[in-house]
Image (tube, grey):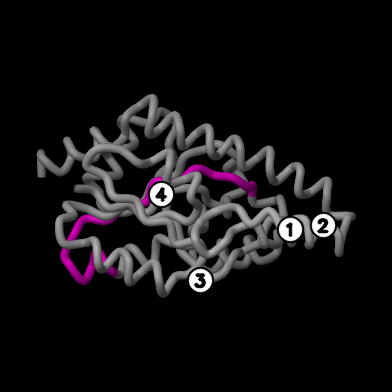
Amino acid sequence: MILIATGLGREARIMAGPGVAVIAGGGDLARLERDIEAAVGNARAILSSGLAGALDPALRAGDIVVDGDERLVSALRGALPGAVAGRVVGTDSPVASVAAKAALRQRTGAIAVEMEGHVAARVAARHGLPFATLRAVSDAADHALPPAALAGMAPDGRMAIGAVLASLVRRPGQLPALIRTGREAERGFRALFRCYRVLGVMDVVEHALDMA
C-alpha cells in the first residue's frame, strides 16, 4: 500500500485508487500526522502530493515538481515528461505573498512550497520508509494568493465556500486575484488528474519499489 498525504478533498479524490490510502489534512497538521501514523503499518512508501506554490520564477501553473527518494524521483521523471526535480519545502502555514515566496526561495533554495510534505516526511523517517513529493504548481512565484483563497480550505479538506464569500464581502477588490487563482488552481488539478488517471504514476511508484 502507498500512503499519500494531501490537503484538499478534491486532491484526495484524484489520487484514490487500488493499493492507495490518501489522507487529506485540511490544514490541520497535527491531525494529519496522527492520521498518517495510524495508517502507516501497511505502507511501502509515503508520498506528499497535491497542489503547490511555485518559488522558482520559471515554474508556471500546471507544471509538475518532484523531490525525495532518488529511486522514486527518477522513476517519476521518466514517466512524467517535463517534470522538474528540485527541493520542495513544507511549511506550517501558507506562503501567500510574492515577497514571502522570494524570501523562502532565497533561504532554502527550494523550487516550490506546500503544507503536508514535511509532516509526511517525518513519519516516513520514523518508520524507515521511502518518501517522495509529487506536486502540481497552482500559483506562480510572481502571483500572490488573495485572502479569500487562503480561507478556502475547511479542516476536513473540503472547500469552505462560506468563508470565501465572507472574505469577498469584506474585501471585494480581491475578486480579480481570486478568479486568477481559481484558474491557475484548475491547471494544477488537471495536471494532477493527468498524472494519476492518465499516466498511472502509482504503477510507476509500485514498480520502482519492486525493483529496489
Q: Nearer the viewer, residue 21 or 198?
A: 21
The residue furthest front is 162
Snapshot quadrant of residue 31: bottom left
As displayed, is residue 189 above or below residue 111?
A: above
Q: Position of residue 179 (x, y in %)?
A: 76, 43
Residues at marks 1 and 4, CA–CA distance in whole angstroms: 23 Å
Q: Position of residue 84 (x, y in %)?
A: 44, 41
Type of residue at label 4?
Ser
Residue assigned mark 2: 168
Which of the two labelled residues, at mark 3 and mark 2, occupies the earlier sequence position?
A: 3
Which of the two labelled residues, at mark 2 and mark 4, occupies the earlier sequence position?
A: 4
Type of residue at label 2?
Leu
- Helix, strand or loop for disc 2: helix
Q: Residues within 10 Å of mark 4 (few under 14, many from 20)?
A: many
Label for residue 64?
Answer: none
Residues at marks 2 and 4, CA–CA distance in whole angstroms: 29 Å
Which of the two labelled residues, at mark 4 and mark 3, occupies the earlier sequence position?
A: 4
Q: Is residue 8 magenta?
A: no
Residue assigned mark 1: 148
Range covered by the magenta-colored residues:
123-140
Q: Position of residue 77 (x, y in %)?
A: 34, 36
- Helix, strand or loop for disc 3: loop
Q: Are marks 2 and 1 in contact (CB under 8 Å)?
A: yes
Residue assigned mark 3: 92
Type of residue at label 1?
Ala
